[in-house]
Image (tube, helix red, strand yellow):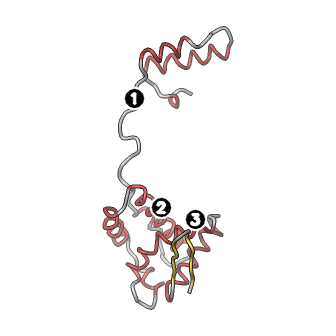
Amino acid sequence: MSQLVLGERECSAAGPLTPIVEGYRKYLMVDQGILSKTAGGYIHEIMPFLAAYTGDIGDVHKRLSTLTEAEVIAFVAATYPKMSRSGAAMFVTTLRAFLTCLHFSGITDRSMTASVPTVPGRKMSSLPKGTAPDTLKLLLDSCDRKTALRARRHAILMPLSRLGLRAGDVA
């Protein structure tokens, strides 16, 4: 039996799942350069998926080799509502890594990572807030244009203030 210690949690893989879990751990640590603790977290995240799709069958490799994109999508769709946004994002990241491992190791004949849906929602779903006119005036007035560097800063700030461009939009 293989055991993983994850902080306060312990995650075990016994029986037919042991070779799959150990192969995934090796893929993460050796091929992807992921640290042991992070690999343990990835394995912990993927265990519900493995349990759902391998069950108590003896030939885990055979079951995983017949895994379809539709099954992956169905599992993710059923799992999303039970997770927070960040938890769902972590899960789909680990699921993509696991599916890549299955393909890389020859268990599946094709990559199924594209079938994993993205997590809906964005951190910045609204437009950026504008700068108050008084603050903007103070900022522009603070640019003493007597040196080339300060004149450049002023030249960058002017289109930002007039066009509402973000700092990343000015090259």
Q: From this view, report whether residue 117 is shown above or below residue 136.
A: below
- In the rendered image, residue 110, in percent from the top left (x then y), is placed at 47, 71
Q: Amino acid at mark 2?
A: Thr
Circle nearer the N terminus (1, 2)? 2
Callout 1: helix, strand or loop? loop
Q: Which mark is residue 129?
A: 1
Asked which quadrant contains residue 7, the reply is bottom right
Do the numbered discs 2 and 3 sit on residues whose CB atoms are within 8 Å? Answer: no
Kind of residue at disc 3: Thr
Measure the C-alpha gap from mark 2 to mark 3. Answer: 12 Å
Dot 1 or dot 3: first in sequence order is 3
Give whichever of discs 2 and 3 has the lower sequence position.
3
Image x and y of residue 43, in percent: 52, 72
Spatial separation of the CA atoms under disc 1 and disc 3: 36 Å
Q: Are marks 1 and 2 in contact (CB under 8 Å)?
A: no
Q: Residue 62 in the image: x percent, y percent?
A: 45, 85
**Label 2: which residue?**
93
* Amino acid at circle 1: Lys
Q: Residues within 10 Å of mark 2 (few under 14, many from 20)?
A: some
Cα distance in 3D space between marks 1 and 2: 31 Å
User: Badge 3 local density, few (<14 within 10 Å), some, or many (20+)?
Assistant: some
Q: Return the residue at label 3.
A: 38
Residue 51 placement: quadrant = bottom left
Q: Closer to the camera: disc 1 or disc 2? A: 1
Indicate the position of residue 157 as horizontal and vertical percent values.
53, 19
Foreground pick, 113 / 85: 85
Instruction: Identify the residue shown where x is 56% and y is 76%.
Output: 4
Which quadrant is home to the C terminus? Answer: top right
Which quarter of the figure is the N terminus placed in? bottom right
* Front in this rendered view, residue 13 or 16: 13
